[in-house]
Amino acid sequence: MASDLQTQPPLSQNYLLAYPAPHVLLVTINRPRGMNSIPYAAHWEADAIFQWFDDEPTLRVAVITGAGEKAFCAGQDLIEQGEIRRKPQPRQMMQHPFSGFAGISRRVGKKPIVAAVNGFALGGGFEIVLGW
């Protein structure tokens, strides 16, 4: 399955990518200690992953889920936001991509993404569930 890919996926520190069946991409938000909350950089990682997914001809559907047993996604990483308030960052570091929360909520991609909700879906995590 991964060996069938025509292009390589972007690297990510916050998501695990797997290929559980032919033509299927499994994207796991891998921050279980933070209830899979998403820091700003991870939104851009997800945007890159889903753009790659749309362009990869061997993939037909993506499934997004959360690591661990407690939360699918608790939304924006509020701890990071608190740190940003104490120590301002460049404005570009505090924005979501055009495709929205986790690269999904305002996505205009051509292939379907299914949410496998395995726990709490709060704030932006619920935006992922709603899709578009």
Image (cartoon, grey):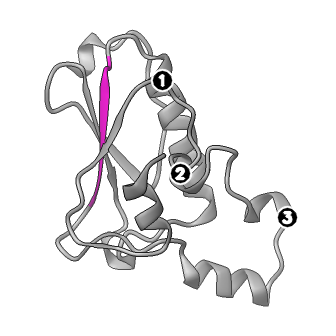
User: Is 64 within the magenta?
Assistant: yes
User: Is 25 within the magenta?
Assistant: no
Foreground residue, 123 or 23? 123
Residue 110, disc:
1
Picture quadrant where residue 53 is located: top left
Percent x, y of residue 83: 68, 85
Q: In front of the other: label 3 or label 1? A: 1
- Counting every numbered tag in the picture gives 3
The residue beneath circle 3 is 91
Using the numbered discs, state the Cα–Cα distance from disc 3 to disc 1 in whole angstroms.
30 Å
Say left or right for 88 vs 121. Answer: right
**Callouts 3 and 1 close, C-beta under 8 Å:** no
Foreground residue, 79 or 99? 99
Q: Look at label 2 and name its amino acid.
A: Ser
Q: Look at label 3 and name its amino acid.
A: Arg
Say left or right for 73 vs 85. Answer: left
Residue found at x 23% / y 53%: 116
Helix, strand or loop at label 2? It is: loop
Q: Which residues are magenta?
A: 59-66
Residue found at x 70% / y 45%: 98
The residue beneath circle 2 is 105
> Which residue is most to the left?
21
Q: Residues within 10 Å of mark 1 (few under 14, many from 20)?
A: few
Q: Earlier in the sequence, mark 3 or mark 2?
A: 3
Quadrant (top left, top right, bottom left, bottom right) of the N terminus:
top left
Residue found at x 26% / y 22%: 2
Q: Earlier in the sequence, mark 3 or mark 1?
A: 3
Q: Look at label 1 and name its amino acid.
A: Lys
Residue found at x 48% / y 23%: 110
Using the numbered discs, state the Cα–Cα distance from disc 2 to disc 1 in whole angstroms.
14 Å
